[in-house]
Amino acid sequence: MKIVVQVKLIPDAAQAPALEHTLPAINEAANWVSAVAFEHFKLKGSVRELRKRCYGELKARGFGAQAAQHIIKRVADAYTTLRANIRAGNLGPEHSKRRQKAESKPIVFRPHAAHTFDDRCLSWNYGTRTVSIWTLDGRIRHVRFACSPGALKQLTEHRQGESDLVFRDGKWFLVATCEIPEAPRFEPKGFIGVDRGISNLATTSDGDNHSGRRLGRYRRWQARNKAELQARQTRSAKQLLKKRARREARHATHINHKIAKTVVAVAQRTGRGLALEQLQGIRDRVTVPRDQRARLSSWPFHQLGSFIAYKARRAGVPFIEVDPAYTSQRCPRCGHTEKANRPTRDHFSCRRCGLAGPADHVAGANIAQRGATAWVFVNMPDPVPASTGTGKCDP
């Protein structure tokens, strides 16, 4: 299983200018390669075709052989991703404005967009916590980096493949890929259902509730500050807005990590699996009042689900997604499903058997039941094909 580990680079006064010169030059060269690819191949250029047209020019601009290859591959991968998004319909139908805009111009890379380095361009020294990295001004050595002891252990034992050089908020980072072995998956004794929501970010079938009140209060505080900055209409205000948006996203990510870690730990300790709802496309299906639209659009449900999924795989906890239809209207005891079973958002009361309780807890119980049923169905052994005899009895 692949995960990423981020470390902070601490270049000195002589090393920082080399990095500051290299990354914008790489992205400028990538924009040139992208323009060539669009001019000659539109969206269908391959790595081999781009290499024939662009490799010599990149070498003439001062890029090493491996750096030039990475720039070409990066551009080709970007067009491959764009083609895949168009085929999947992620940019709308054929004549939509969004799709026409994407198809009418070459892909553009930001001046400080992240760039990939492999082991030929970047080497790690874990003992001294330094890296050696290629730049246009020559290879710079003994660039210090900082990370937690846990991250250093993961790098030392599991780092493989390429790393990305990132420049963000005036700081340099390396994002390394680590191949972590998955724990053997155990056979679950039952399932924990996890209901995701806005007011309550996650509620389990055990009754554990992870409220979103503090996150909502934090987002409202950020929204008030955002409105004040937007009213200024200055360059510094716009830069501060971007910085605050990234801080808010990091805060939500931290909360989701804590919730996922807690849920997976409970499942691992009790020997049960985890069941979640399939919520893809929920923003297109659900209609909310105008004052709730911002909350719905900033709801990080997909991120929470992906965190639970990868942490479960890493811990060997069985994980499955189930159909979310009527999970908040169905009674987990008698099976009666009716809209009137949920008279308010927070309360559930079955009209047939009288079972009552918090609506999110009831939804989690329904998800747990569906998860157990789906797990048995998915892991059911294939039927043995019937023998094709002649109809005659054996002697």
Image: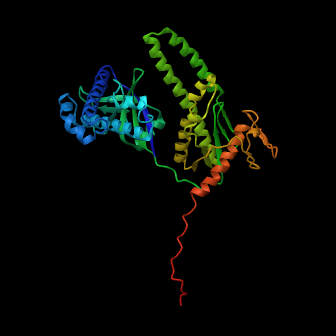
Side (left or right) of 97 relative to 135:
right
Residue 48 horizontal/vertical position (percent): 24, 42
Q: Residue at x 60, y 36 (%)?
A: 259
Name the colour scheme. rainbow
Q: Quadrant of residue 81?
A: top left
Q: Is residue 271 visible?
A: no
Count numbered badges in the picture: 0
Q: Residue at x 45, y 34 (%)?
A: 92
Q: Residue at x 35, y 32 (%)?
A: 103
Most extreme residue toward the front is 95
Q: Nearer the viewer, residue 9 or 255?
A: 255
Side (left or right) of 270 relative to 139:
right
Most extreme residue toward the bottom is 395
Q: Residue at x 24, y 37 (%)?
A: 50
Q: Quadrant of residue 301?
A: top right
Q: Quadrant of residue 74?
A: top left
Q: Nearer the viewer, residue 40 or 193?
A: 40
Residue 335 vs 52, above or below: the answer is below
Residue 296 vs 387, above or below: the answer is above
Q: Is residue 96 visible?
A: yes
Q: Nearer the viewer, residue 204 or 317?
A: 204
Residue 89 horizontal/vertical position (percent): 45, 38
Residue 302 horizontal/vertical position (percent): 54, 37
Q: Nearer the viewer, residue 271 or 50?
A: 50
Residue 347 horizontal/vertical position (percent): 75, 35
